[in-house]
Image (cartoon, coloured by chain):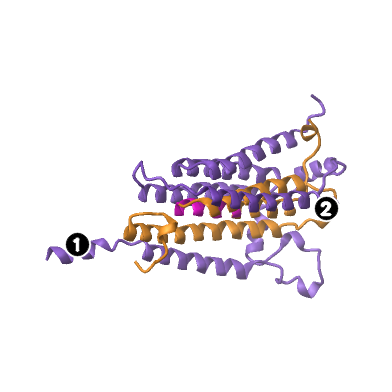
Amino acid sequence: MSLLTEPVGVSHMMTVGAIMFVAGVVCMATKRNALGVLMGVELVLNGANVNFVALSSNFLRNDAAYSMGLDGQFVALFVIVLAAAEAAVALAITLNFYNNHATVDVDRADELRG
Amino acid sequence: MDGINWHSVFFLLFALVACGFAVAVVVSSNIVRMALYLILSLGATAGLFFLAGADFVGAMQLMIYVGGTLVLLVFGVMLTAQGPFVSMKTRGGDWVLTVLVAGSLLVLLIPASFSIGGWRNSGEAMPEAAVAVQSQPRTSAPLGLGLLGVRVDKLDEGPAELRAGMSGYLLPFEIVSVHLLVVLIGAAYLARSKKRRDTARFET
C-alpha cells in the first residue's frame, strides 16, 4: 500500500520508461512481421520520451532546481515528430516490399532491390 | 482514506496500463491486436505526461502518436494483410536469447533509476508544488516561444550576452520542418503504385 500513499518520484516514471524500452527491444528482436518491428521502435522511442518528461518535471522531485526545466519537453516534442516521420518512411518501404515480394516477413527481406 | 495520494493512484493506474499493454504488444502474435495494444499503451503514456505536468507534450502525444502515427500503422496492417493461415513464428532459441538480454537490461535499468537520491520524492516539497501548479502558466506558450528562439522560462538565467537567443530551439525547429517536408515527398514517392504502368504496357 505504500505506493498509494507515498508521492511518486522521477524514479517511478523512469521505471515505467525502462519497462517500455525493454518491451520495445524485445518486440524489435523477436517479431518477424515488419510492422511488428515498427511497433517495437515506437515503444522504444516512447520509453525514452517518458524519461525526458520525468526529468523535466518540477513536481516529481525534492530538488526542483536541478530539473531540466522545459528542455526535456522540447526534446520529447522533437522525438514525437521524428517518430512520426520515421513511421511514414518505414511504412512506405514496407508497402513497397510487400508490392514486390507479397510478404512482410523480415527474414525474407535479404535483398531489397525489388 | 485520508492518507491516499491520488496523484500516486492515478500514476499507478496509467503506469500499469502502459506497461501491461507494452508487454502485451510483445507477447501477442496477431498484428491487429498488437496495433490495438500499442494504441492503449501510448494513450496511457499521454496520461503519465499529464501527471508529470507536461500538458502540451501529453496533448501532442495523443494527437500525433495516437491520432496520426498509429492510424498510419493500422492502414499499413490492412494494406499488407496476410492470409489467415500464414504464421510467422519466432524460433524458441531466439526468444530465450532475447529475453536473457532484455532481462539483464531491465535488471540494470531499474536499480539505476532508484539509485540517485535527488530523483526521489519524499513529499516535503508537495504543498509548495501544489501551489506552483495552481499559479504556474500552462506550458504551451513557453514551449511555442522556445521553438521560436525565445526562452521566456529562463529569462533570469545565464549571462546577459548569452540570453539573446542562444538557448532557443529555432534551428532544430526549422530542421525538423524541412525534414518533415522531405519525408512527405519521399514517402509519397516510395509508396506510389508502379503496377499500373506495367499492366498498361502489357495491354497495348
- Of the pair B149 and A16, the residue shown nearer to us: A16
**Viewer-nearest residue: A70 or A61:** A61
- First of labels 2, 1 by sequence position: 2
Q: Chain of mark 1?
A: B
Tell me the chain of label 2: B
Chain B pictured colour:
purple
Residue located at (49% from left, 43% from top): B34
Quadrant, the N terminus of chain A: top right
Q: Which region is colored magenta?
A: A33-44
Q: Which chain is orange?
A: A
- The residue nearer to you, when weighing A22 against B201, is A22
Circles 2, 1 touching at the beta carbon (< 8 Å): no
Q: Amino acid at mark 2?
A: Ile
- Give the residue drawn at x 70%, y 36%: B12
Badge 2 marks a residue whose secondary structure is loop
| A111 left or right, relative to B113 | left
Q: CA distance from mark 2 to mark 1?
A: 64 Å
Q: Are marks 2 and 1 on the same chain?
A: yes
Q: Position of residue A72 (x, y in %)?
A: 70, 58
User: In the image, residue B149 lies at what x, y percent?
Assistant: 66, 67
Give me the disc on residue B116: 2
Residue at the bottom extreme of this rendering: B161
Image spot of residue B10 (x, y percent): 69, 35
